[in-house]
Image: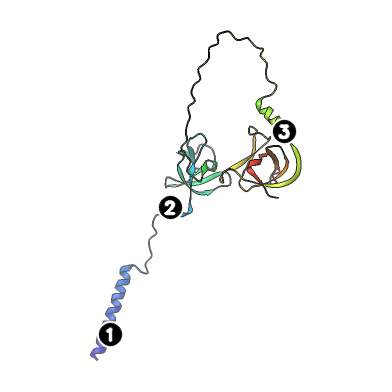
Amino acid sequence: MNRKLLSLVLALALLLGLAAAVAESGIGTAASSPNSYTYLDQSVMTMYVYTDNGQGLNVRSTPYVGENIIGLAPYGSKLSVIRFLDNGWACIKWDKIGEAYVQSRFLQWFEPAPLVVVTPTPIPTAIPTIAPTARPNVLPAYTDTMAELNKEFRTARLITPFVVQVRPSRASGWVNMRWAPSKDAEVLATYRSGSQLTVIAETQSWYQVADPNTEATGFIMKNYVVRQY
């Protein structure tokens, strides 16, 4: 009888010890949620600021150009990109306080080399020994831009229509469709990588294309598209 009582006492003591261990370890209690940023580090993309003139990139509170600048990202600085928008903007993490926006065409995947500014050596002005002979004031018949445009149009020809896919020089960039086959011509629309257009004519360096979604027509450089079918 004493042995049975002793066994019960030992079993009760063992159960009380296990319960105390569970309570000490916190098993079965709700863990508190730590304060953390909405977007985890592994969900963002690291990209770098690149501008042709070496200037910084405006950081804005909303994805459009206006009175919404909240900061400046220097040339070559590293940015954490959360996602890309369809209108040519990228959403980034800014100052650990939330989301901001920059134009995605000024971002690239690798760190750019430092921009080297070359100062041209001034050329001394030659002093003529004799007075130059006056020439009649004759205006040129065409500007250089018009001459180049005419030269490109002379190579135009109709072709059997086919489909091309837009391939900009940078994956995050886009390609301009212009009203004439010239880099100085007005931009009618911009297309991101993967957009499909129908070629209806061509010149030496340009395709005349039609947008099947908007029915807009214009010219796009051959170097930035790939034939599909």
Residue 79 point in image, percent of width and height: 46, 45
Q: Quadrant of residue 182?
A: top right
> Which residue is under mark 3?
153
Question: Of all residues shown, which one is farthest toward the top?
Answer: 130
In the picture, the disc for residue 37 is: 2
Q: Nearer the viewer, residue 60 or 169?
A: 169
Q: Quadrant of residue 35?
A: bottom left
> Which residue is under mark 1?
8
Say which residue appears at 68% left-offset and 29% top-offset: 148
Above or below, 91 relative to 151: below
**Label 3: which secondary element:** helix
**Separation of marks 2 and 1 at Cα, in angstroms:** 53 Å
Say which residue appears at 28% left-offset and 81% top-offset: 12
- Name the quadrant of the N terminus: bottom left
Residue 70 point in image, percent of width and height: 46, 39
Mark nearer the N terminus (2 vs 3):
2
**Separation of marks 1 and 3 at Cα, in angstroms:** 104 Å
The mark closer to the camera, 1 or 3, is: 3
Q: Nearer the viewer, residue 28 or 124?
A: 124
Mark nearer the N terminus (1 vs 3):
1
Mark nearer the N terminus (2 vs 1):
1
- Rendered image coloring scheme: rainbow
Q: Is residue 17 left or right of residue 155?
A: left
Kind of residue at badge 1:
Leu
Above or below, 40 relative to 3: above
Q: Nearer the viewer, residue 89 or 42?
A: 42
**Label 1: which secondary element:** helix
Kind of residue at badge 3:
Phe
Above or below, 139 relative to 177: above
